[in-house]
Amino acid sequence: MLAWLLALGAVLCLAYFIVIIFYSGIGTAYAFIWLLLALGMGVTAWCVWHYQRYPRKFPLRLPVSLVTLCGAGLVVMLVLQILIISKVPQVADSGLEYVIVLGAPVSGEMPGRTLRLRLEKAAEYALQNPETVMVLSGGRQSSGEMAEAEVMKRYLLEKGVPEGQMVLEVRSASTVENIAYSRLLIDTLRRQKEREEHPDERALPAYLPSVMGQKADSHQIGILTSNFHLYRAMQIARKQGMEDVSGIASESDRILFLHFCFRDGLAILKERLAGNL
């Protein structure tokens, strides 16, 4: 029974790999993972079947080791997928001071499929909350190309978002850098705003807001990204000290959703080992 279940898993992984290749192309990032999974499950299924048929000719430790490894990996990935999917129905808080829109790959001067879906959600939020500053975060994939943030700005301008409602962060090359550089940019914008509102800081003592019953820092920050990516992004933000960050989830490609979730699960493990979570 176990051998047949593993064989079925291998067939499903191989079938999904073929779907990804035909739907999104051979260049789809990390699509080969499903081929490796299919191969791993297929080998394990063969080992289990061979041992069950020839128990004396096959060492027990090999199928046991493979099944244990597969089982442990499955449990870890299931836990991660539950955490990721728990953020999928995230409801956006309205009236945020700043919203960081995380970048994604672009194609020339056009956003890719994932980024386009994020920008659709960003345009919707920006038009509904005209006082919110949209921080568009994303650097250049390679020299000579437009920065992701610049592509994002052009797309949002076409959707009717005012230019004055957007600021660009063009140095980042990863989710960790997206959030870190965007936070530095927001801190700069806050200081500029405070200087404009209170040019003579001596006229307003530092303790006055708390004396008046108001919080000293009332700015709120949101992070807008794809639903499968939101959990990791928010955990990175909290690791960087942004405890009260709000999440805004955009839709993602339905056919590739499983692939994106699995890929982000592996990225969570990598970020955990790197100390970013």
Image: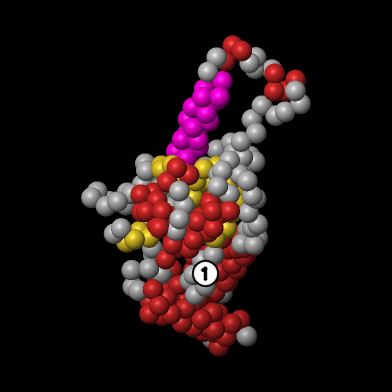
Residue at point 49%, 27% (across, down):
192
Place of residue 223 in the rendered image (x, y in percent of width and height, measured from the top left): 55, 48
State yes or no: residue 186 in magenta: yes
Residue at point 54%, 79% (across, down):
9
Residue 272 in view in this figure: no
Place of residue 45 in the rendered image (x, y in percent of width and height, measured from the top left): 52, 80
Q: Residue furthest top?
A: 202
Residue highlighted by disc 1: 257
Q: Amino acid at mark 1?
A: Phe
In the rendered view, would you say 273 is above or below 204? below
Which secondary structure dominates the residues rendered in magenta? helix
Magenta span covers which residues? 179-198
Place of residue 21 in the rendered image (x, y in percent of width and height, measured from the top left): 38, 76
Residue at point 41%, 43% (across, down):
168
Residue 99 in view in this figure: yes
Place of residue 185 in the rendered image (x, y in percent of width and height, measured from the top left): 46, 35
| Quadrant of the image containing the N terminus | bottom right
Q: Is residue 70 left or right of residue 29?
A: right
